[in-house]
């Protein structure tokens, strides 16, 4: 069952609330809905976490945590899902986002080599940045909505399957 699986691997509310670095949030972390594992909170967590994993920005986890609080989704799951984009997966994800943005803007995909210098950044920022962020917003929104719908569908399917199984067991118990 997905609920048992998630409870096994996600941190407990007490562990997160005990972190000194998060004390500035005050009583917000004591909101029980941020820790519930149900169809709605998990689906919203996927919506938030997957949306932020496709956005090229520093401190994605902080953004995901703030939006998880705002949307009342499962906080730890929202933050964990941001790690889909990690140092290994970021280059292909963001290059794909750039290509989508360039396609939407009807711009040619530039062949470029990344160079960590202010001259390169100032020269290429608009050429690469606008298609990158437009593509990122589009891919993030579509991916997050699809993930939300898939979680809703799979959770409902599991519940229906469990109901049918229990109904069959009750019918078998009554006939015996």
Image: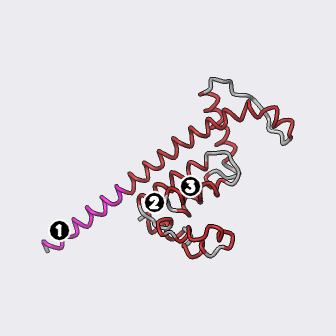
* Residue named by callout 1: 171
* Residue named by callout 2: 41
**C-alpha distance separating marks 2 and 3:** 12 Å
In the image, which residues are magenta? 156-175
The percent position of residue 62, horizontal first and vertical second, equals 64, 57
Q: Residue 108, relative to residue 71: is it above or below?
A: above
- Mark 3 or 1 closer to N-term? 3
The percent position of residue 2, horizontal first and vertical second, equals 44, 63
Q: Residue at x 72, y 33 (%)?
A: 128
**C-alpha distance separating marks 3 and 1:** 45 Å
Front in this rendered view, residue 31 or 161: 31
Left or right of residue 68: residue 85: right
Quadrant in the rendering for residue 114 = top right
What label does residue 153 carry, if any?
A: none
Q: Residue at x 53, y 71 (%)?
A: 30
Front in this rendered view, residue 170 or 123: 123
Q: Residue 141, relative to residue 8: is it above or below?
A: above
């Amino acid at each position: 069952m997905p609920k048992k699986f998630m409870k096994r691997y996600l941190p407990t509310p007490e562990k997160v609330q005990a972190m000194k670095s998060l004390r500035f949030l005050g009583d917000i972390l004591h909101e029980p809905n941020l820790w519930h594992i149900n169809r709605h909170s998990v689906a919203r967590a996927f919506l938030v976490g997957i949306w932020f994993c496709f956005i090229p920005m520093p401190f994605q986890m902080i953004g995901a945590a703030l939006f998880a609080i705002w949307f009342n989704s499962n906080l730890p799951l929202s933050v964990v899902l941001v790690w889909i984009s990690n140092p290994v997966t970021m280059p292909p994800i963001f290059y794909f986002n750039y290509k989508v943005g360039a396609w939407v803007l009807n711009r040619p995909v530039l062949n470029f080599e990344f160079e960590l210098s202010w001259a390169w950044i100032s020269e290429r920022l608009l050429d690469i940045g606008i298609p990158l962020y437009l593509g990122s917003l589009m891919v993030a929104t579509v991916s997050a909505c699809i993930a939300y719908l898939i979680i809703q569908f799979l959770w409902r399917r599991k519940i229906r399957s469990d109901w049918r199984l229990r109904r069959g067991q009750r019918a078998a118990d009554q006939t015996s």
